[in-house]
Amino acid sequence: MEETTGDQGKPVVPESELRASPQERELAVSRLQDGYVSGYLDDAELDARIRRALDAKFRSELSVLVGDLPLTAPKPSAVGMRPIKKLKVHGGRLAKTGPWVVGPRLRSVLYKGDMVLDLRKAVLTSPLTRLKVRCYKSRLEIIVPGGCRIDMRGRTYKGTWDDRSSGGLESGPLIRLEGSVYKGSVIVREDTGEGG
């Protein structure tokens, strides 16, 4: 291999041998998720590639993982963010909207309050997202993008679990809701494209 030197006589490292940044790893994960949602990858391949992307040390490793996928519009404002693991509301209102990163497990605790989780611009880091809910005399609304599958496994006492989504695509990401609702409600609705 022929060594090249820069302006000051220092060796120039080829682009493929440069170390990958955390932001570049997250961008690769986002492209893999887009490829999964678009049907280019199955569950097992997505899972394996995400693990490899998160462990990648060099840019060349990331290029191999996403090189066979079509270019899609990345979500640059979510790149570099850490996944949120827990959200709490106590007697107030919380609306989580815009770009944000959701890990494989998210816990929501509501006590006499309201929470809106808007997943339309969120980056889901796993094909299965488990959302553990504890909702006491509260209202939780979850807005999902088209194509998401919903699996509700919660219990209720004088409350409601209401799935208003269309059922999603078989290859779409799965959001599993677990937990309990006491005199409150959990509502899942799909983005209708009507802005609300």
Image (tube, grey):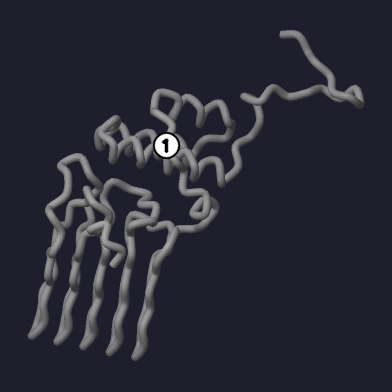
Residue under pointer 1? 72
Give coordinates of residue 132: x percent, y percent: 25, 68
Pick the quarter of the image with the C terminus: bottom left
Q: Residue at x 27, y 89 (%)?
A: 112
Q: Residue at x 66, y 25 (%)?
A: 15
Amino acid type of disc 1? Answer: Thr
User: Where 75 falls versus 9 (above or below)?
Assistant: below
Does 169 sit left or right of 40 as displayed?
left
Q: Residue at x 39, y 70 (%)?
A: 96
Give coordinates of residue 167: x percent, y percent: 12, 53
Give coordinates of residue 68: x percent, y percent: 40, 23
Residue lying farthest to the front in this orientation: 194
- Give the camera-side residue of 98 and 129: 98
Q: Residue at x 42, y 37 (%)?
A: 72
Residue lying farthest to the right in this orientation: 8
Give coordinates of residue 185: x percent, y percent: 17, 79
Report crowding for label 1: few under 14, some 14 to 19, many 20 or more residues within 10 A (C-alpha).
few
User: Where 31 falls versus 83 (above or below)?
Assistant: above
- Give the camera-side residue of 165 and 183: 165
Pick the quarter of the image with the N terminus: top right
The part of the image, by quadrant, that contains residue 11 is: top right
